[in-house]
Every structure is written in C-alpha cells, then in structure tokens.
Image: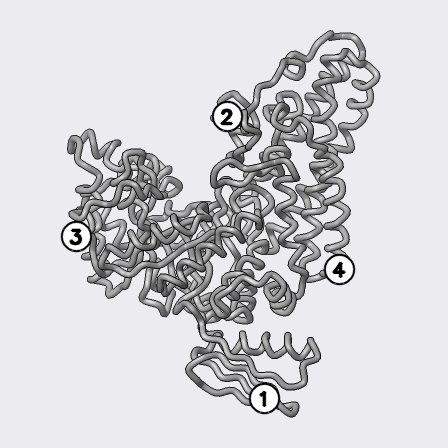
C-alpha cells in the first residue's frame, strides 16, 4: 500500500494495489476504513474521492456532568474518530481539570491531572486530531462555587461575580491550567445560559445594570487575559440572542439582535451556534444568517441526545443533525461538532454516541444522509450493527407517544424512577403495554450482547434495563387498580412479585456499575446508586403496604388509589419528556 499527501481524500485499489491520498493525517485513517469497506464488498477495482464540507468536524466530550471519561476511554474514542475521519475533540470540563491555586476546584469530582490531559492530547496528535479544552468563564460554575471557601467568587448559584478582581484572577488561573496540557492554542470559554447574571450579590453591591452592559464589560476583561496568554477563543452565542428576545428565547427570529450589540461584540472570539432542537430548515438557516451579522466566525454545535435518560434518543439526534448540517454546508459554516451532554446524572454511557459520530463524519465527507451507507461505514469502524444503536430510541417511546415541542419523550427514565406507590405518570401511560414492550427489548439486547462481544457490557446493560423496566411497568399497570377494586388476590400476587423486581433492579445496578467503571472514573456513580437504591427501598415499603392490604389490616393505600392527573401529556395527546430525577420521584420536595 502507498500513501501520499494530496488536496483531498482519495482511495484507489487497482490490480491488488492500494493507494491512499490525504489532505490531512486523519484522512489517511478514514481512507483505511474505506478501503476495508469496499474490499469487503468484493469490489475488485475502485477509486473513491472525498472532499470534506467542513474544515473542522468532531465531538465535545462532556466530562462535567458526573461522568469523567478515563484516559483509556478517550483513546478508544480517538481511534474510532480517526477511522471515521473526524479531526476535532473538545474536552468539556467545567471544574474537572486541575487548577493548583484552588484545591476545592473539582474536589471529589474526578478531576484530570495535567499529565492525564497531556497523555490524551499526545495520543490524539498521533492521528492528526486536534484536542482542545472547553471551560466556563461566566456561568455553569455551580459545582466549583458550592464549597464555602469558593463562595466569595459567586454572584448567584451558577454565575461568577463579574467585575471583581478575584474573579479575573480565578479566570486567568483557569485559562492557564486548562490550556497547559494541549498543543492547541484554541479554547472554548463557555459564556452560555447566564440567565440570572447580575441579579445576586452583584445586584446588592452595584445596583441594577443591563445584562448587555455586564456581559460586554466581562468579555472585555476575559479577552484581555486571552490576548495576554496568546489564546484563540470561541464562545456559545446564546446570551446575545436571549438579550434581544422579550421571552429570553435563543431561537427568537422575530426579534433580531440590536445592531449596537453586534457592533460591540469582539471580532476575534468565534461564536458557537448551538441547536439540538430545531429541524425546520427556515429556522436553522435564519439562525445561521443572524450569526453572520457578527464580525466573528460562526461555528455550529449539534446534539446527540444522551441527556434524556439511560438511553440515547437517535430519532431526534438524526433528524436534527441531518437538517442542521445540511444548512451549515449550504451556508458555508466551516466548523461543526456534536455535543453529547450528561445532564442529570450522565445516565447514558458515552459509548452510545458512536453512531452519531459516524453520522457527523458521513455528512461531512459525502454531504448527504444515506442510511444504508452510514450503517455500512459504522459496521467497519465500530464493528457492530447500526440498529443496536438506533433501536435505543425504543427505550424512550413506543407508537402513540408523540412528543410535543423539541424534546423527545423519555419513558425509560421516568418509568425507571417512578415511585411504586406514588405513580405520577399513571394517567400519561394509560393504554400503553409497556411491560411487553420492554420484555421484547430485553430479549433483543440479549441477542446483541451475544453477537457483538466488543459491546457486550453495553448491550447487557440495556438488556438488564429493559428487564427491570418490564417488571416494574407490570407492577405499575396493576397496583393502583388492584387497590381501587379491592382485589385481594391480585394484591397477594403483587406482594409476591416484589423480590423479582428488586432482584432485577440490583442486577441492573451491578451491570451499570461495571459499564460505568469501564469508561469513567469512579466519581459520580454514587448518584445513580442513590437513585436505584431509593427505588429498591420504596419497593420494600410498597410490598409491606400491599401485604397489609392483602391481609385486610388496612382497607386502602390512598397514595395508590387516588385518581391521577395528566402530568407530561397534554389534551392533544402529545407528551413532553421529564428529564430531571426530582421531578419524577415525588411531588414533594427532594431537597
């Protein structure tokens, strides 16, 4: 085989000789996987040429929402990215990197050391992949500032105190520490979702100031530090758009950003337009065009929907990604990347992102969405069947569950954590045969676990999740009516079913822990442990009360027998997801 530098990716196989031409190193590795694909198809002679639509294309690793990837896991993803041809990895670390001057920064959260990040960066460089830091310099710092010795830095729970010299000393130390391990001089400085900026300690000290003025002042100071350190930055763009919107909406195209705000925005900090929700090309193109009014470059961040619960939702991920990247290609956006957030516990393992990464790669190199080619490419780079990943959507919904707005229904999460005695989703789930639905999924993922040994643990986890959901949904489908109908025979059956349910939840916990430890540092799993342990404890209480009812010691279980109201389902039959554990577990306060 021969390899050489060219102005595009070219794979040629003629007379049993292979040649790969590449414009940048990572394309050589994509070329290898293309060579294997076409040879496996039995093609004797072929020539393939690809020219990327985007200068940069990759993924942001969320290492801040409890799950902090191990260096070995990062290396695994880098190898897969190389075979796909992705050239950008972004390490999203709110407080999970070492800042020596602040020992409480990332305390007990699994922070990366300098050496760990340098090892990851060195490895990425072997494949021609840029690894770069992504931090926060305004909001999303709640975990760092929760400690008593760090609270002098806060304006509100999430937002840094703007205008204080201590804050800018903190930011400079963060920027130095975050960038030191990397070759790249680029950094993402965050700046998103600072909804209550200037409304906490800042307000008490300085009085009310418009958020536009506060952000402008803060960004000027941060920009000075960036220049001092020789760094090139990008930031999320939403605060500019929210300021212009009466409803503080990011995607409000009816209220354009005032020209004065645009004129005051820096021209040397790229703006990242993030959109995980919209599928309408008019909204997507409109948002890109609004970004183009700024002098700075525009990047795009889409979403692989890992944050809706234990199962990544690929229906939503594919629909939004295809629509958004198509508009980015047409309108000349040169840098795109996928996010895969771990909101509310990082319940979906990052391994589930792989198929979404392949989608980003194929949209980049071919400019189109071809499900058959995408699946074939994925089979080569990741050695598994695409349907093992796309079928994860079935954990979240089944026919008849139609989402309202931009967020998918996420039945796997709310049915897993729904209380056995206080079923808040009872009315919403009427008419759905969830126990049989999840039983079939359990059987299917057992087969996947046997067929694809590289992902055996991942698919075993989903088989165990489906089994626990099936048994749990069977309880939910019978328990309330049993009490309402005074069915003592059914009550005895429910009492007898609890040990199997508890055993299934414990099996799920053990597999989940093994999966977590296979990709993540140990920190963070305690939250999942507490949630699952809470469900086990509540089933023990439910068993006790149901036995009292079956034995005639009590004649009602009022929390079960009371008529339930619709929760996430609207009168038109459409549903919204319930993405936060505390909204699922109880109607009472959980803190």
Residue that sits furthest to the front in the current view: 282
Task: Point out the tag, 4 or 3, that comes first from the N-terminus.
Answer: 3
Pointer 2: what residue?
590
The vertical placement of 57 against 511, above or below, is below
Would residue 384 appear left or right of 150 to someone viewing this image?
right
Element under label 1?
Answer: loop
Q: Is residue 153 visible?
A: no
Element under label 3?
Answer: helix
The mark lying in front, picked from 4 and 2, is: 4
**Residue toward you, 491 or 400:** 400
How many other residues sit within 10 Å of disc 2, few (<14), some (14-19) or many (≥20)?
few
Element under label 4?
Answer: helix
- Mark seen at residue 263: 3
> CA–CA distance between discs 3 and 2?
45 Å
Pointer 4: what residue?
451
The mark lying in front, picked from 4 and 3, is: 3
Task: Point out the tag, 1 or 2, that comes first from the N-terminus.
Answer: 1
Q: Is residue 109 visible?
A: yes
The vertical placement of 24 against 114, above or below, is below
- Mark seen at residue 1: 1
> CA–CA distance between discs 3 and 1?
54 Å
Q: The N terminus is located in which quarter?
A: bottom right
How many other residues sit within 10 Å of disc 1, few (<14), some (14-19) or many (≥20)?
few
How many other residues sit within 10 Å of disc 4, few (<14), some (14-19) or many (≥20)?
some
Q: Position of residue 425 (x, y in %)?
A: 60, 26
Task: Point out the tag, 4 or 2, that comes first from the N-terminus.
Answer: 4
The mark lying in front, picked from 3 and 2, is: 3
Task: Point out the tag, 3 or 1, that comes first from the N-terminus.
Answer: 1
The vertical placement of 176 against 406, above or below, is below
Would residue 576 appear left or right of 476 to someone viewing this image?
left
Label pair 4/2, CB-CB below 8 angstroms:
no
> CA–CA distance between discs 1 and 2?
62 Å
């Amino acid at each position: 085989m021969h390899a050489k530098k060219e102005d595009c990716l070219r794979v040629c196989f003629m007379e049993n000789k292979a040649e790969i031409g590449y414009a940048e190193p990572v394309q050589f590795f994509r070329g290898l996987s293309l060579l294997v694909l076409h040879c496996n198809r039995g093609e004797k002679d072929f020539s393939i040429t690809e020219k990327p639509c985007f200068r940069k294309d990759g993924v942001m690793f969320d290492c801040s929402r409890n799950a902090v990837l191990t260096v070995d896991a990062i290396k695994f993803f880098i190898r897969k990215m190389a075979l796909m041809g992705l050239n950008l990895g972004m390490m999203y670390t709110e407080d999970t990197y070492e800042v020596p001057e602040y020992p409480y920064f990332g305390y007990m959260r699994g922070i990366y050391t300098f050496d760990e990040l340098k090892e990851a960066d060195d490895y990425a460089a072997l494949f021609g992949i840029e690894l770069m830091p992504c931090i926060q310099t305004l909001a999303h710092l709640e975990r760092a500032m929760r400690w008593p010795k760090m609270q002098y830095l806060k304006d509100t729970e999430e937002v840094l105190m703007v205008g204080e010299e201590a804050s800018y000393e903190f930011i400079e130390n963060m920027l130095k520490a975050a960038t030191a391990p990397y070759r790249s001089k680029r950094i993402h400085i965050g700046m998103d979702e600072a909804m209550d900026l200037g409304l906490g300690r800042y307000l008490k000290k300085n009085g009310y100031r418009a958020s536009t003025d506060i952000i402008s002042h803060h960004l000027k100071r941060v920009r000075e530090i960036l220049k001092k350190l020789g760094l090139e930055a990008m930031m999320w763009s939403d605060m500019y758009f929210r300021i212009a919107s009466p409803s503080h909406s990011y995607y409000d195209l009816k209220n354009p950003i005032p020209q004065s705000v645009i004129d005051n925005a820096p021209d040397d900090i790229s703006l990242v337009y993030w959109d995980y929700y919209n599928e309408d090309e008019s909204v997507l193109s409109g948002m890109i065009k609004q970004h183009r009014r700024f002098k700075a470059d525009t990047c795009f961040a889409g979403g692989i929907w890992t944050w809706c619960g234990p199962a990544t939702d690929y229906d939503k991920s594919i629909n939004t990604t295809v629509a958004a990247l198509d508009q980015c290609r047409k309108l000349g956006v040169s840098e795109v990347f996928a996010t895969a957030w771990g909101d509310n516990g990082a319940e979906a393992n990052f391994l589930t992102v792989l198929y979404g990464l392949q989608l980003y790669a194929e949209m980049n190199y071919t400019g189109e969405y071809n499900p058959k080619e995408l699946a074939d490419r994925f089979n080569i780079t990741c050695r598994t069947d695409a349907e093992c990943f796309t079928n994860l959507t079935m954990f979240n919904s089944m026919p008849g569950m139609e989402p309202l707005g931009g967020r998918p229904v996420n039945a796997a999460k709310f049915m897993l954590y729904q209380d056995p005695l206080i079923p808040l989703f009872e009315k919403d789930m009427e008419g759905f045969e969830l126990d049989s639905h999840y039983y079939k999924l359990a059987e299917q993922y057992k087969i996947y676990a046997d067929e694809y040994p590289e992902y055996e643990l991942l698919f075993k986890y989903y088989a165990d999740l489906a089994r626990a959901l099936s048994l749990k949904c069977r309880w939910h489908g019978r328990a309330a009516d049993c009490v309402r109908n005074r069915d003592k025979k059914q009550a005895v059956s429910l009492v007898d079913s609890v040990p199997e349910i508890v055993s299934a939840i414990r099996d799920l916990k053990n597999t989940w822990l093994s999966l977590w430890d296979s990709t993540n540092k140990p920190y963070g799993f305690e939250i999942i442990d507490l949630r699952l342990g809470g469900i086990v404890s509540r089933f023990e209480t439910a068993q006790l009360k149901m036995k009292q009812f079956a034995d005639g010691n009590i004649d009602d279980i009022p929390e079960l027998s009371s008529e339930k109201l619709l929760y996430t389902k609207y009168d038109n039959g459409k549903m919204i997801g319930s993405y936060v554990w505390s909204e699922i577990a109880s109607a009472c306060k959980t803190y």
